[in-house]
Image (cartoon, rainbow, N blue to C red):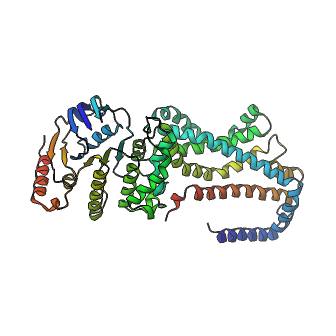
């Protein structure tokens, strides 16, 4: 699904974030990208989303070199980027409205995308995420969990195959976070999504990531990968294996590379 | 402001006016009842037309200013490069009281409606430009990136993010400047015209010495200003309900 070959990226006048970086993500895998702040995990997500362009090397997504944003890639950022002046439903339907605005041009909207059914689609996703009762609320009137679900509904309504999330659960209280982590995983299974979750929380990475990519202080050259096949299994969170992996990752994060 | 408070305010002012008129007891300060009567009778003999002419001049200026300044403000707010070139010019021009350009504008644009509309346009233009630009600059980057990731290019960003995000700024700019706009209209209508409330007030006050009619004109001009102000208020509540969440 995703292949990074000899990727290099740097912001002007600073240490390169990535150098000769290689990474491969297979279809329908769920990855957590973990690292301290400033390690480049958000940068990696923006590169995958096509919002940044690599200095050299390639970002291949579904076999195609990334150039600009790709209609089948969904992106959910930390504060969700909802429009404050739009109601929950208007926010959910936003991506569909944008697609209808351009029409199926193959660039902003996939050629085969049916723009006529989009009211129904929005209603379906509102309902799926339990938002129907909150249709007319503005983001300022919603709880953190509701805002997150609006962001998820808005993204899934566009029928993505790749879902990129940047700290999507970090502003939520613990019970809401845990519930939404489960729900996000279930939806990703059901929609056969490849999912990349960027997080600074070791626990979250181990709960969500079937594979974990650990980034360190830039420049990142080697992809440090941890297999975590038990992730998203409800009872795993209390198991010794879970704590052992958390412990190992904590040690890795604390040792300077 | 509640309707009741508004009515109380108007009543209070009218009473103060009446009492002052009784105390001063001079033809240069007629009471509100006399002025009210003259206002009604003058409406049919020309005041209504002067009012409509003034209203038209303000309205067309407002529409032109919004249509020109808002998109320009959005563009400057988005493009650092353009902003670097244009903003110093705006910075210098912004605080200059535009009314001092009136003689020049009259020289260039001559008589008729155009110079009057232009001077009001100029005042509103800068007010809207600056507010919309600053507002567009401050739109959350995460919001823009998110909407981009939903497939939005420049045009869709403009339509779905920048435009709705700018509405409150446009209305705030209008609210702040309609008062000035009407004041400037008054001055502009003193020159080279025989229509408009400015002309009407000056004619009755300084040529005909018909003070009650002059006051009726002042009332009409006040109503024009108030009406504009209330309309902006009403629009803001209609168009930007999300700004009024409790």
**How far across and how far down the image is residue A172, in percent?**
31, 60
Viewer-nearest residue: B5 or B213: B5
Q: Please state if B227 lies on the left or on the right of A77 as rendered.
A: right
**How far across and how far down the image is residue B220, in percent?**
78, 57
Q: Residue at x 23, y 31 (%)?
A: A5
Quadrant of res A1: top left
Above or below: residue A86 compared with residue A58: below
Quadrant of res A16: top left
Quadrant of res A177: bottom left
Viewer-nearest residue: B174 or A133: A133
Viewer-nearest residue: A27 or A98: A27
The number of numbered badges drawn on the structure is 0
**How far across and how far down the image is residue B234, in percent?**
63, 59
Above or below: residue A139 compared with residue A4: below
Above or below: residue A209 compared with residue B118: below
**How far across and how far down the image is residue B207, in percent?**
88, 50
Q: Quadrant of the N terminus of chain B?
A: bottom right
Res A183 visible:
yes
Res B97 visible:
no
Q: Residue at x 88, y 61 (%)?
A: B41
Q: Please state if B219 lies on the left or on the right of A152 as rendered.
A: right
Viewer-nearest residue: A251 or A77: A77
């Amino acid at each position: 699904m995703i292949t990074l070959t000899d990727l290099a990226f740097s912001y002007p006048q600073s240490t390169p974030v990535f150098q000769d970086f290689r990474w491969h993500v297979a279809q329908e895998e769920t990855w957590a990208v973990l690292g301290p702040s400033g390690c480049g995990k958000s940068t990696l997500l923006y590169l995958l989303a096509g919002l940044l362009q690599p200095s050299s090397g390639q970002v291949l997504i579904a076999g195609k070199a990334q150039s600009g944003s790709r209609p089948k890639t969904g992106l959910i950022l930390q504060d969700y980027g909802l429009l404050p002046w739009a109601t929950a439903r208007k926010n959910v339907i936003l991506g569909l409205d944008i697609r209808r605005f351009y029409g199926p041009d193959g660039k902003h909207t996939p050629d085969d995308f049916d723009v006529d059914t989009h009211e129904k689609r929005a209603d379906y996703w509102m309902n799926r995420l339990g938002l129907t009762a909150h249709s007319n609320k503005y983001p300022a009137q919603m709880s953190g969990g509701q805002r997150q679900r609006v962001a998820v509904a808005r993204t899934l309504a566009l029928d993505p195959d790749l879902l990129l999330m940047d700290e999507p659960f970090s502003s939520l209280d613990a019970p809401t976070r845990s519930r939404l982590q489960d729900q996000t995983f279930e939806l990703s299974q059901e929609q056969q999504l490849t999912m990349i979750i960027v997080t600074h929380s070791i626990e979250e990475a181990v709960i969500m990531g079937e594979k974990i990519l650990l980034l360190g202080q830039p420049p990142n050259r080697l992809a440090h990968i941890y297999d975590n096949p038990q992730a998203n299994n409800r009872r795993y969170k209390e198991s010794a294996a879970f704590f052992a992996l958390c412990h190992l990752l904590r040690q890795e994060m604390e040792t300077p590379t | 402001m509640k309707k009741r408070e508004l009515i109380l305010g108007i009543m209070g002012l009218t009473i103060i006016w009446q009492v002052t008129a009784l105390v001063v007891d001079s033809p240069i300060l007629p009471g509100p009842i006399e002025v009210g009567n003259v206002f009604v009778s003058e409406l049919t003999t020309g005041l209504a037309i002067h009012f409509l002419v003034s209203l038209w001049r303000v309205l067309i200026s407002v529409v032109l200013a919004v249509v020109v300044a808002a998109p320009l403000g959005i563009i400057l707010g988005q493009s650092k490069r353009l902003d670097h070139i244009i903003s110093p010019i705006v910075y210098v021009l912004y605080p200059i009281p535009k009314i001092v350009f009136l003689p020049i504008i009259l020289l260039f644009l001559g008589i008729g409606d155009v110079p009057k509309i232009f001077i009001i346009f100029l005042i509103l233009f800068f007010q809207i430009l600056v507010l919309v630009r600053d507002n567009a600059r401050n739109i959350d980057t995460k919001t823009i990136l998110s909407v981009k990731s939903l497939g939005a290019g420049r045009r869709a960003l403009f339509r779905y993010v920048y435009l709705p995000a700018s509405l409150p700024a446009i209305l705030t700019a209008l609210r702040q400047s309609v008062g000035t706009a009407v004041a400037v209209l008054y001055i502009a209508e003193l020159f080279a015209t025989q229509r408009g409330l400015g002309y009407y007030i000056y004619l009755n006050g300084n040529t005909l010495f018909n003070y009650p009619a002059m006051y009726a004109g002042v009332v009409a001009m006040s109503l024009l200003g108030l009406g504009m102000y209330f309309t902006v208020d009403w629009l803001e509540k209609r168009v930007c309900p999300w700004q009024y969440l409790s």
